[in-house]
Amino acid sequence: MAMDGDTRPNDLSAFWMPFTANRQFKKEPRMFVSADRMHYRTSDGRAVLDGTAGLWCCNAGHNRPKIVEAIQKQVAELDYAPAFQMGHPKAFELATKLVDMAPEPFEHVFFTNSGSESVETALKIALAYHRAKGQGERTRLIGRERGYHGVNFGGISVGGIVTNRKMFGTLLNGVDHLPHTHLPDRNRFVRGQPEHGAELADELERIVALHGGETIAAVIVEPMAGSTGVLLPPKGYLKRLRDICTKHGILLIFDEVITGFGRLGSSFAAEHYGVMPDLITCAKGLTNGVIPMGAVLATKEIHDAFMNGPEHVIELFHGYTYSGNPIAAAAGLATLETYAEEGLFARAAGLADYWADALHSLKGLPHVVDIRNEGLIGAVELEPIEGAPTKRAFSAFLKAYDKGILVRTTGDIIAMSPPLIIEKEHIDTLVGTLADVLRQID
Ligand code: PMP
């Protein structure tokens, strides 16, 4: 029950919360009621420093007037319009802006409403592309262990986070997984990309040898795996993956739902790592997390493969009621303008060293077994309590919240990905508070 002066609702039973320990939460609810720039405010009036940009999405921070005004203006002007056989200007403008900021080979944009939908869309485009090219036997999809590609059936099939898969029985057929790239015995407390593990990309050759390259449609990976606890690609790994895909005519999909829009200091990780996939999925930072929206970026080569039939026939039988929704598109345009006007991607790049120094200062604190970082993302891995995995990191999360910082945990890993508007003092507060928490938990 809410205490006096606490504005949270009394009845919490109806909302079945996503990815939440519902029974625990409803005994000790944590609730945000407002937010501004780097801080949330809780229902009992406390400020909480946002160390995770919401769910890795509010890259420009909260309550940004330009985005708020763009949404208000759009909703009063054109609240909804379909994008099936009809158009409205904002969706086209946003697609053009995205193409302008994306690396060169990406010339076309398909809009979705979330990261999960972007993944399903990219997988379907890959399958349909091969059919359009007369290679319909290419149906096999390759993901990676520990990969997170959202929660729909395609995404959990190519994904490799065991807990997200094992409750649900039937998944897509014809899916294989590359090994993950987490090699704690060889890469520990590394700043940025690890030295060891590029050869893990060669496992794709093993999968090709097993099934025949001509049966494989696409490989999907997060260039930097976020949700599993911030696993960076070993040096040379992505390039090797790209080369093997090219050699066998397999499409490479980068799932950039977290890494898109400045997280690593450039527009997309493809640019940051200098490796170009054939399709990029994104969402989250596209609208600063304010309105649900995702997108798939496609090269001209992919798009044009669909443009050969009679002109009046729909080229790709796929889309969502809210694809390119006007309000989301207006939010997206205002968001991209905010990133550009404030130079936020360069800002993230400029703060990366300070961020790395701060995070790595936690080395040596109780239970800390690894620290990883890149751009403005980082993870602190804790030694699991024997017989109670995830419990230690979860207690750290709860204590951190009590002390006024928001971090995210996955397994025994504490992940952080603050808004790119973060100041050095905020980094000091975030990491300093986390240090206090680590000293206090069992
Ligand atoms: N792909 C990746 C790489 C993600 O990190 C996420 C979300 N964390 C998703 C897909 C799914 O996005 P959504 O929750 O918007 O469906």
Image (cartoon, rainbow, N blue to C red):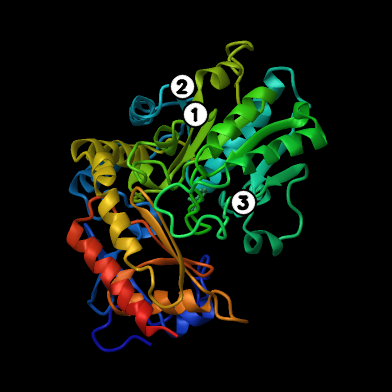
Q: Position of residue 256 (x, y in %)?
A: 47, 42
Nearer to us: label 2 or label 3: 3
Q: Give the class, few, some or many, for how many residues have Cα within 10 Å of label 3's Cα (few <14, many ≥20).
A: some
Q: Position of residue 99 (x, y in %)?
A: 39, 26
Quarter the C terminus occupies: bottom left
Nearer to us: label 1 or label 2: 1
Q: Give the class, few, some or many, for how many residues have Cα within 10 Å of label 1's Cα (few <14, many ≥20).
A: many
Q: Position of residue 284 (x, y in %)?
A: 41, 48
Give the residue pinned by disc 1.
Answer: 276
Q: Give the class, few, some or many, for how many residues have Cα within 10 Å of label 2's Cα (few <14, many ≥20).
A: some
Disc 2 and disc 3 in contact, CB within 8 angstroms: no
First in sequence: mark 1 or mark 2? Answer: 2
Q: Is residue 202 left or right of residue 344?
A: right
Q: Position of residue 113 (x, y in %)?
A: 47, 44
Amino acid type shown at disc 2: Pro
* Residue at the (44%, 48%) spot, across then down: 258
First in sequence: mark 3 or mark 1? Answer: 3
Q: Disc 1 to disc 2, how far (Cα)?
A: 8 Å
Which numbered dot is residue 180?
Answer: 3
Amino acid type shown at disc 1: Met
Q: How many marks?
A: 3
Disc 1 and disc 2 in contact, CB within 8 angstroms: yes
Instruction: Mark yes or no: residue 56 visible.
Output: yes
Q: Disc 2 to disc 3, how far (Cα)?
A: 28 Å
Amino acid type shown at disc 3: His
* Relative to 28, residue 217 above or below: above
Quick one: 291 or 410, which is closer to the camera? 410
Give the residue pinned by disc 2.
Answer: 105
Quarter the N terminus occupies: bottom left
Q: Is residue 341 left or right of residue 161?
A: left
Nearer to us: label 3 or label 1: 3
Where residue 315 sits, quadrant-wise, is top right
